[in-house]
Structure formats: structure tokens, C-alpha cells
Amino acid sequence: MAEESILNVKCRLLELFSELDDSELHSIEAWISTQSYKQDLEIKKLLLEKERKLSKIANSLKNMVPFEAEMPSEVIMPPIIGDQADCTKENTCHVDEFLYDDKEVDELVKSQKLTRFYCAECNSRNIKELIFISHSMSKQALQYIFYVLLPQDLEEKHLLDVGSRLGAVLYGAYYLCNASSIVGVEMNKECCEIQENIIKKFSMDSNRIKVVNADITERSDIVKNSNIIIINVLDFFVDVQKHKEMWHFFKKHIKKGSYLISNRSMTDTLDTLELSEEMAGWLKICKPHQVANEIFFDVEDYSELYLYTVK
Ligand SMILES: C[S@@+](CC[C@H](N)C(=O)[O-])C[C@H]1O[C@@H](n2cnc3c(N)ncnc32)[C@H](O)[C@@H]1O
């Protein structure tokens, strides 16, 4: 690094240090002088390397799906109940977080390929902000799941992603953890074909990672065999009745001791579906297993990811 760049780094560090009080500064000094930052730095580098791998997959996917990442064969409807009931076809735009991170979204807006606003009344200045919704998990959320929430060692564990869509969770699991098997069950055939293409293109071990084209409620065998079940919010894809049916099915078939991860609290999901009483005592919220790794994340960004154990 040139002398000028070193100066630049020092300048940035001083900027950060100037915001700290004495005891905070003391703890940073200790972190650096005891060299324990070096271990953290190794993990940080590893995370960046894995993120680059996932970005390569995301870039391949961009060439395989429409810009909105919704397939012609899909029926995607804004939900009529719950915290996303304010979404309509007019005010909502799907921007897939696995394909486009915040920086890329800013670039798309800058180049006018994407807009953040819609006109509520043509030719007027009465514009409103669009709701951006993602049907996939972001790369950072996946890193948080496997580096903070779940235990580090998942050997001999079987992971299931309910509704695996473009496969974001599957690829995240493949590169970020050591689970023995990773299965995605997805009801949309086109999405399954895309996932299979990616698995092949990136030479992933097809004995470890698999996609099954089915309605999950027809595959109790897979659910019963799984120790880790990831469920991204399904509201846009199933009506209320089907959604309730799915939770009854999960309660019946997910085995005790399994982990369940969702990007909305189960209290909210079950309350909205009026299932709280019936499901009371089924799940227990869990603390993250790898708390030390929170250092790599802005924890507030991930407060919407929840880990439960099945009682
Ligand atoms: C919000 S997306 C989740 C994508 C992926 N799990 C992720 O987090 O990146 C939900 C997916 O679930 C699928 N899905 C909804 N109900 C399903 C069902 N009963 N069986 C299988 N797939 C289902 C939808 O087709 C959709 O692709």
C-alpha cells in the first residue's frame, strides 16, 4: 500500500476513534494490541471470499431470469392480511435481494433502470415511494444465519429450504456451512430448473445439494428427515387457507429438536393467521449460537431473522 493510502486509512481510523469515549477506545486498543483482531480478520476475509462466490452465482442468475426475477408461470399476489397487506400491484416492486444488494440497487436507480417512486396521479408532483420487496434472502442475511444464528458445526444435519425459488438459501448453505444435506422444495417448475442449472454450472456436489419440484405438503418424508428448516415469508405465494394448512402440516411433521429459521417472528406469522392458541408452546425462541461473530454484521440489519427450536 502506498504511503498516501496508509495516510488515508489512518485518517479514516482517526475519524472512527474520535467518536469513542475513553473506555471504548481502551477496548479497541486491547483488541489490536493482543492481536486478537487477526483471528477476526481471517474470518472477515473468508466471509468476503464466500460473498464473492455467491455474487458470481447471483450474476449467472441475472442472465437466467427476468429483471423482476418473477417467472411467467408464477402466480404472485400481494397478501390481504398481515404486515405486507399494504402492498398492491401498483405500489410494490420486486427487487431480488440475492441478485441485487443495496449498492447495486442504488446503481440501478442512478441509471434509471429502476425507480423508487410511482406517480399516484399522472402529471402531478404527487409521487409516492414504491415498496421494494424481495422474494429471496440477501447474501448478508445468509451469512448471518450460518455465521451467527446456527451452531458452527452442522455435520450430519439435514437442511431444508421451504420454497427454494432461485436457490439463494441452498447456495448459501452449500458454501457457508457443513450440513450433510441441503434440500430445496419448490412448487414452481421453472424455478426448479433454474436451480438445477446453477447447481450444475457451479459443479456443486449433487449428492449434497438437491432440488425437489413439489408442494411441500406432499413431502412429509423430507420435512421429517430435516434438522434445520428455513422458511422465508410465503405471503405472496399462498392464500390464507393454504398458509394455515402449511403451518398445521409443519407442526405435525417437523421433528422435535429441529431448528426453524424465519425472517419474520413466528408470533407475528401465527397471530395474523389466528393460529397462536393452537400452536402455543410448539416453538422456543433461541439465542444466536455464534455470538462472537456478530462483530462482522450490523446486528440491527438482521433483527428480522429469528431462530427457534421445536419443542
Ligand atoms: C419468498 S420465496 C423464498 C425463496 C427462498 N427460500 C429464499 O429465501 O431465498 C417463497 C417460495 O416458496 C414457494 N412456495 C410457496 N408455497 C409452497 C409450497 N406449498 N410448496 C413448495 N414451494 C412453495 C414459492 O413458489 C416461492 O418460490
Image: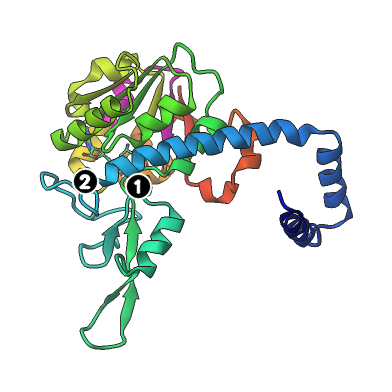
Q: Is residue 248 left or right of residue 20?
A: left
Q: Is residue 260 magenta?
A: yes
The image quadrant that residue 137 belongs to is top left
On the image, the x and y values in percent for residue 150 come to 52, 27
Would you place residue 25 above or below residue 257 in this image? Answer: below
Characterize the local packing of mark 2: few (<14), some (14-19) or many (20 or more) Cα atoms within 10 angstroms: some
Q: Which mark is residue 99?
A: 1
Residue sitting at the far left = 73
Query: Which residue is label 2 attached to?
Result: 65
Give the residue furthest to the top. 156
Amino acid on which disc 1 is placed: Leu
> Which portion, as a residue range, is magenta?
247-262
Type of amino acid under label 2: Val
Q: Closest to the observer: 201 or 26?
A: 201
| Residue at mark 1: C-beta within 8 A of ligand 1 | no
Q: Quadrant of residue 216?
A: top left
Marks 2 and 1 sit apart, C-alpha to C-alpha, by: 10 Å
| Tag 2 secondary structure | loop
Q: How is the image coloured?
A: rainbow
Q: What residue lies at 44% left-to-right and 29% top-to-bottom?
A: 283
Q: Quadrant of ligand 1?
A: top left
Upstream in the sequence, badge 2 or badge 1? Answer: 2
Q: Are marks 2 and 1 in contact (CB under 8 Å)?
A: yes
Q: Give above or below for 43 relative to 111.
A: above
Residue at image location 30% in from the left, 62% down from the top: 86
Q: Residue at x 42, y 52 (%)?
A: 101
Furthest-front residue in this view: 2
Circle 1 — which element?
A: loop
Q: Is 302 contained in the magenta span?
A: no
Q: Is residue 11 above or below residue 165?
A: below
